[in-house]
Structures are given as C-alpha cells and as structure tokens.
Image (spheres, rainbow, N blue to C red):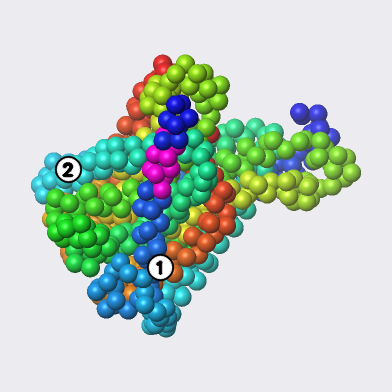
Amino acid sequence: MTAGWRHTERPFPWRRSLWIAALLTPALVVMVLFVLWPLLSAFRLAFYEFSGLRPSGFIGLENFRQVLFEKPYSDWTYNAFKHNVIAFLALMVFENGTAFLIAFALLKALPGHRVHQVIVFMPVVLSAVIVGFLWKLFLHPLFGLVNQLLGLVGIAAIPWLGSENTALGSILFANIWHWLGFPTLVLLAGMQRISKDVLEAARLDGAGDYALMTKIVWPLIAPSVTIVTILTFIGSFNWFEIPYVMAGLTGSPGGSTDVLGLYFYRTAFGSTTTGIQDFGQGSALAVLMFIFVAGVTAIALRYLRRREIEQ
Amino acid sequence: MRDRGETIRNGAIQLVLAVNAVIMIYPLFVMVTSSFKTNAEIFSSPLSLPTHFSTANLEKVWTETNFVRYLANSVGITAASVALILLFSTLAGYAIARYRFRLSSLVLMFFLSGMTVPLKLAIIPLFIQLDTLGLVDSYLGLVLVYVAMGIPSAVFIMTGFLRTLPRELEESARMDGASEARIMWSIMLPLARPALVIVAIQNAVPIWNDFFFPLVLITSDNLKTLPQGLTVFVGELTTDWGVLFTGLTLAALPITLLYIVLSKQFISGITQGAVK
C-alpha cells in the first residue's frame, strides 16, 4: 500500500503535507466554526444569565432549576414533554405498525409493487410546511375535505384542530401521512435481505402468511427495527415543524399540542404574543433535551442490539 | 385448493396496497385540482372536479405575492449549499481515503462525530456566532449552517467510496509525472460520480424543505425561502383557499416532478444511513 508513496514522499515531504492540509482545511474550518464551537458553547451558555443576545453573568444551575422546578416554567416543560412521549408511542404503533404491514405486502413483489413503493414515499420528499398546511385546510371543520367525506356517510362535523381531545391526534395523523414511506422502505429493505431459502423452507413446512410474518420475518429484521425505533425516538423529541404549522407557536388549543421543540423555540426566540426571549433558559432546555435524547438512545441501542443477537 | 388460497391472499395484499395508495395520492390530487377552482367552488363542492380550468389563482400567486422571490431564494440557497458540501467533503474525503498521514483516523473520527450532533439544539450559540460574524439575515449565514450540517455524513460517504477506487490508476499517472491535483481532478473524481449523486440528493432534499433555520436566521422578506415564505403567504391569504392550494401545489411541484423522474436515487439518498 505504502510502496507507491515513497518516491513522492521523500523529496517533498512538506509539499505533500501542505497538499493534504489544503484538502482538509475548508471542511474542518466550517465544522469548527459552525458545529464544534456552537456545541461546546451550548453547554456553557446554559449556566449564564442573559441580557438580550449576550451572556451577562454566571448563575450556576439556576436556568435548569427554573425549567425543571419553578412554576409556570416547569408545568410547561412537563406538559410539552408528555406530548413528545405520546407522539413517540403513537408513531411507533400507528406509523411503524402500518409501515411494517405495507412493507410485508410489498415483499411479495406482486405486479405493481414498484409503483406502490414510489407512491408511499412521495409525501416524504415534501416539506413539512406544505404537508402541515395541506392537512390544516383538509381538517377545517366546515369546508375541509375530511369532514366533507365523513359527511357523506352521515358523520357530523368534528373540530379536529379546534378541540383539545383531537388536536394532537390530528397533527400526528398528518405526520404519519408525511413520513409513512420512510419506515416502510427501511423495513422492506430489511425484509429483502432475508434469504429466499429461509422463506421457501418455512413455506414448504406449511407456514402461512401470518406465521411467516410473526415467526420468520419479524425476528430477522431486528436490525431494521432498531434503526426505525431510534430514528422515531429522535424525531419525536425534535418534533417542531408540523406542530408549528398546524397548531401554532403556543401549541393551541390550550397547550394541548405543545411539544418541547415549540417550547424551546418560544423560550429562546420569543413567542409572538409576549416577545420575551431568554437565551439562558433556552440553552438549559436544549442541554436537557440533548442529554435526554442522547442518553436514552445510547441505552436503547444497547438493549436493542442485544435483542438482535438473541433472536 | 392451495392456488385458490394464494389468489385470495394476493388479492387481499393488492387491496391493502391500493387503499394505501389512495390515501397517499388523493390528498395531493385534491390539492392540485383545488388550485384551479374559485373560492366559492371549493367551499360549496370541495369533492368535485373544477368545472373549468381557471388560471386566475396562478396569476394572483405570480403577481400579487412574493412567491417567485421565495422560489428563487430556495433554488439559490439549496444549489450553493449542495455545491459547497460536495466540494468540501470530496476534498476532505479524498485526503482521508487516498493518503496516509498521521492524524487521518483522528480527522475522520472528528467528522463522523459531527453526524451525531443535532445542530438544531445548538441554535442559540449558532445564532450568537452568526450574529458576531454579521451573518444573521443573510444568504451566506444560512448556507454555511447547511454546509456544516451536511459535511459529516458527506465526508463519511465520500471517504468510503473513494477508498474503493483501485490504486493502480493513480500509481500509473504518478509514474507519468502527473501532479497530485491533476490525478485527483482528472482521474479519480470522475469515477466518484455515483457517490456524488447520492450525497447531492441526500442533502438537497432536507435543505430545500427546511423551515427551522430560515425561521430563526432570516427576517427580511426578500431573503425568505419557499417553506418559510409559505407561512407568510398563508398568513396573508387565510381565506382565499384557491390561492392557498395554488401556492401549496406550486411549492410541491418542482421536487415532486424531480422525485418521479429520479425516484430510485431519491429513495436511496434519503434512506441512506438507515439501510445498510
């Protein structure tokens, strides 16, 4: 491997080093300035009080105490957190559950399966802003497509986004419609890696579709399930755009759709109504969210990886 | 007997897929057809097709809103960001993949660790940083943030791909006295095209669709991107549904058409990382 190097290396070692450094510099500079430095600062700033955009004094854990233990901030934090947890569980069951069934249906490679793959993935390429506004119009209580269709079968109009009981479910539905294709195709790719021989042998032993799905396919796609679970978790706790577009910055109605992403944004950059912004509290929230997501992801990965091996 | 069971099962599978396809496509279909309707038509008969193809909404979007400006901004910002990501990460990936030097594994580790950083959560220091550099509310500030976000996984993909290229090619060019830059540019990089396409799509789609960073970093209406501009647009025209559906349709159109043409590359680019 190194043999070819020797003759260029020896006469001009400094020229070679300079060339390598030149290749690396642009990427490294951008990373240091806009990833490494902001990330390190994020942890530091959480311990400071702010006046406007600049830190004005070290206050220890005060920002953390406020967002976790001082009302009304703590109420807002836990209310938002609760909705992130609900979103994660709902997406695991409804989005990934549906994705698994559709992937299994696509695995058979019946006529038209390629077109179905393209169709199920189509909303994934759209901006969450487009998807959010589209469903906001469709869920309008009087003129929206959904209530119009339900009206055809005699169901009275439901104020989807206007009622605290249905608002979170409605924006979760829009989110599932948006993202369904992603877990579907990831799980399908996992299923396609199962060897044909294994599936054939199970069939010859008389396994029906249901047994094939639960006893053979499900355990063998454990690595794909791990990835989908982790990505769903990270996505649920960074959820921002669809709630922002469909329910507004305050998670209306009555905070019933508030999530940590919205609460963080309001704290850091000011809600439209109060205009108050607090970079210190915002930084503390960001640090807490980062530690929570990174911590749970690390633990879950260990558990899920072990499960993959056992099965 | 077995064949009949098989037919029924396949029929059931096709039914499930067909229902799903309708749920995926019908909302988009209604969005497009509604863009040709008048407001009165949408409110009185939302399910019917437009009676005639009126382009009044389209003209209104084109002339009375800043839509074209938002569209142009998104094209420019996405193109610039992707071009810089490709350039910077190819150079860095080339250095790591093709040369042996002391710190190479450390440098690669540094880039890879960037893949795990959720840059959204570092938005406060990032905002302060850009403010210090005078880059808040500018194209350049937004582009640099996207480049920083894109580099880690792009370096990962490019390094992996460039490592697979045969060493004989560059050795023989080196024997012929070609410079290192020339070997890279005319011999090695043309071979890296498939990886470049994946990296380009993997980055272009989320940048084109991004809403969070423009929301925080861009305040001038003339600099706003398409997703961000849509929120302005919807805020101003809340009751004019014909125009709203037209705006959504136009915003969805470019990427949807591109997706239909390049669906294979889009799917592998977006699921890259989750599919091994």
Q: CA distance from mark 2 to mark 1?
A: 40 Å
Q: Which mark is residue B32?
A: 1
Q: Residue at x 52, y 26 (%)?
A: A194
Q: Residue at x 25, y 47 (%)?
A: A260
Front label number (2 vs 1)? 1
Q: Which mark is residue B198?
A: none
Q: Nearer the viewer, residue B229 or A272?
A: B229
Q: Which residues are magenta?
A: B9-18
Kind of residue sitting beneath label 2:
Tyr
**Quarter holding residue B241:** bottom left
Circle 2 residue? A78
Residue A122 image offset from top left, x and y in percent: 45, 53
Chief secondary structure of the magenta portion: helix
Residue B200 image offset from top left, x and y in percent: 57, 52
**Quarter holding residue B53:** bottom left
- Residue most toward the left? A71
Q: Nearer the viewer, residue A157 or A275?
A: A157
- Residue most toward the right? B176
Q: Residue at x 76, y 28 (%)?
A: A1
Task: Provide the secondary structure element on which disc 2 rests.
Answer: helix
Please tell me whether residue B12 belongs to the stretch shown in magenta.
Answer: yes
- Residue most toward the front? B1
Task: Provide the secondary structure element on which disc 1 rests.
Answer: helix
Horizontally, residue A280 falls left or right of residue B266, namely: left
Looking at the picture, does residue A215 appear above or below residue B231?
above
Please tell me whether residue A80 belongs to the stretch shown in magenta.
Answer: no
Q: Is residue B89 visible?
A: yes
Horizontally, residue B93 falls left or right of residue B127, namely: right
